[in-house]
């Protein structure tokens, strides 16, 4: 298994995995929207081109999992994980661990001290994984608000 940074050559495989992630996420966040594949492909291509967004991929013969993260200049000591997804058939083989190990190395090499992420409260397996990886709950500077337009 090889973990590396994604390139534009990975666009089709990443788009397919991100589509699977969106379907998976709906189990825990039914209000999340699913984009059609053309829109998702365009968005993925734009993210791959951005300097402040990175995708790590784990591949054998094909990409089996990915993690994307964001680097914001205003947060000098933090990076933010956006998505982590491993194909269901490839789970429990250490792929998510390998992606996070690479992320941790990158974070330290770039003088960042904190990795932040959000996870759906109902996604107990993911929460257990993140706790095993050393993540703790933190009080956010943000408050989640919504307005219903019924």
Image (cartoon, helix red, strand yellow):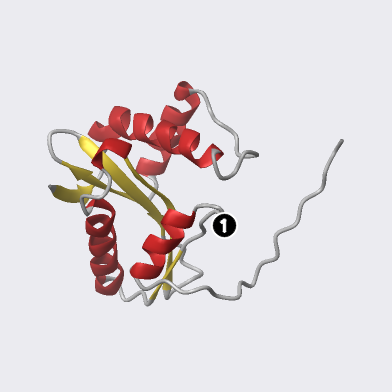
Q: How many numbered circles are shown?
A: 1
Task: Name the residue at the right extreme.
Answer: 150
Foreground: 123 or 5?
123
In front of the other: 26 or 100: 26
Query: Which of the 4 image quadrants contains residue 128?
Result: bottom left
Please say whether residue 10 is visible from this viewpoint.
Answer: yes
Q: Quadrant of residue 131?
A: bottom left
Q: Residue at x 28, y 45 (%)?
A: 91
Question: Is 31 in front, or is 14?
Answer: 31
Q: Secondary structure at mark 1?
A: loop
Residue 23 picture location, percent across and down: 48, 33
Is residue 149 rendered to the left or right of residue 95? right
Q: Is residue 14 left or right of residue 117?
A: left
Q: Is residue 142 above or below residue 64?
A: below
Q: Position of residue 43 (x, y in %)?
A: 46, 34
Does residue 28 appear to the left or right of 20 in the view shown? Answer: right
Does residue 53 appear to the left or right of 59 in the view shown?
Answer: right
Residue 81, visible in the rendered structure: no
What residue does disc 1 label? 121
In the rendered view, tell whether residue 41 sits above or below residue 86.
Answer: above
Image point (27%, 36%), residue name = 89
Establish if 140 lies above or below 67.
Answer: below
Quadrant where the C terminus sits is top right
* Residue drawn 28% across the image and 43% down it: 65
- Image coordinates of residue 149 in percent, x first then y, are 85, 38
Relative image position of residue 96 (x, y in whole percent) = 28, 54
Q: Residue at x 42, y 55 (%)?
A: 125
Label 1: how many Cα within 10 Å (few below 14, some 14–19, many 20+): few
């Amino acid at each position: 298994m090889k973990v590396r940074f994604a390139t534009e050559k990975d666009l089709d495989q990443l788009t397919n995995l991100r589509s699977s992630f969106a379907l998976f996420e709906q189990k825990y966040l039914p209000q999340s929207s699913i984009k059609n594949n053309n829109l998702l492909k365009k968005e993925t291509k734009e993210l791959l081109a951005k300097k402040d967004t990175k995708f790590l991929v784990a591949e054998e013969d094909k990409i089996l999992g990915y993690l994307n993260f964001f680097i914001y200049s205003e947060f000098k000591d933090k990076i933010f994980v956006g998505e982590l997804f491993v194909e269901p058939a490839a789970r429990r083989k250490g792929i998510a661990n390998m992606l996070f190990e690479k992320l941790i190395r990158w974070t330290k090499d770039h003088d960042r001290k904190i990795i932040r992420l959000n996870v759906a409260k109902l996604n107990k397996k993911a929460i257990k994984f993140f706790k095993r990886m050393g993540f703790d709950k933190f009080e956010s500077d943000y408050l989640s608000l919504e307005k219903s337009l019924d």
